[in-house]
Image: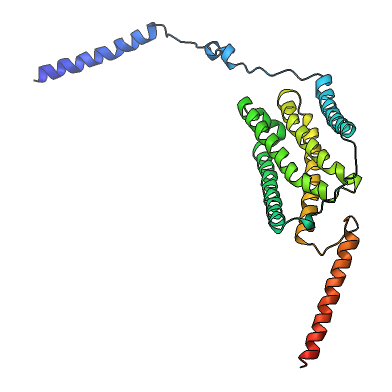
Amino acid sequence: MKTRLFTLLLALLLAFPLASALAQEAPAVVVEENLLENIDLEEGVVEVPPEPSKWLSIGGPLALAGLAVFILVFFKLVVPFTVSEESLNLHHYPTGVKRGLAMTVVFFGIAFCFGASEIFYQLQLHGTTEEYFRQMSLGKLIAFTHAHLFGFTTSFLIIGVPFSMQFNHIPIYQWIFPVGLTASIIDVISWWGIKYVSPNFDIITMGCGIVFSLSYLYMLLGILRVLLLPNVILASDKDAVERGEEIRKSRRLRDLLRRESQEVHPE
């Protein structure tokens, strides 16, 4: 037993220096790996689209603004202003029509507010209008355009027709409906310009947004004033004199009945 233990210890003592000598004599194998060689340059390179020319970045928005002017001038020429021969007054409409129209106008106004809040949310989420439309796919932009063209046309039709009928005697009021609708359509077209041409189209988007928002709200408030506040008479009302006289007669009749009631039943 002692002999075996002594032999094992001797073998270990001899093996250690031998292993050290072999380690010193054997050349170290160093694997030098160039990480850049393993990168697929074709997959890693991100192509940056070239900057659009001045003809597109500046001329494009100007051309779109010119399109808006062309639309308004064209329809002004083909549909000149004429004073309606028929008296169209919302006060003379059936009660159901006035109630339904007032409800429709109110809910369209609510939908308009939700649309404006959605724009604010998207700007907060993406930072800029350019980034928002850059991340939007072509299919979504097509669907977005389709929905908004129908929505803008329908909403302006429902608000603009009764407004223009109510104030058909005022020439400047006959511009509010077509100007607002034209601005909304140009706004939709400018989204394509932002995505595929230049971010400068954002100026057209903001300008059109302001124009169609103000025109839409002006018509909405005008219709609600006529339907919900019939006793509020403005100089722009074509029946201001007639309704004013009717209101005064109604008040005189009410006062007369009150006096007669007090005479018959004195306190």
Figure check: 11 above or below 134: above
Counting from the top left corner in percent of width and height, residue 107 is at 67, 51
Figure check: 205 above or below 263: above
Q: Residue furthest left?
A: 1
Counting from the top left corner in percent of width and height, residue 227 is at 76, 58
20 relative to 230 in the view: left or right: left
68 relative to 43 in the view: left or right: right
Quarter of the image with the N terminus is: top left
Q: Nearer the viewer, residue 174 or 259?
A: 259
Q: Nearer the viewer, residue 213 or 207?
A: 213
- Examine the image and state in which quarter residue 4 appears: top left
Count of labels in the image: 0
Counting from the top left corner in percent of width and height, residue 118 is at 66, 43
- Examine the image and state in which quarter residue 267 appears: bottom right
Residue at screen point 70% across, 44% down: 116
Residue at screen point 34% across, 9% down: 21
Figure check: 258 above or below 119: below
Counting from the top left corner in percent of width and height, residue 241 is at 91, 62
Q: Nearer the viewer, residue 257 or 232?
A: 257
- Snapshot colouring: rainbow
Residue at screen point 90% across, 32% down: 77
Q: Residue furthest front?
A: 86
Residue at screen point 78% across, 48% down: 162
Q: Nearer the viewer, residue 130 or 204?
A: 204
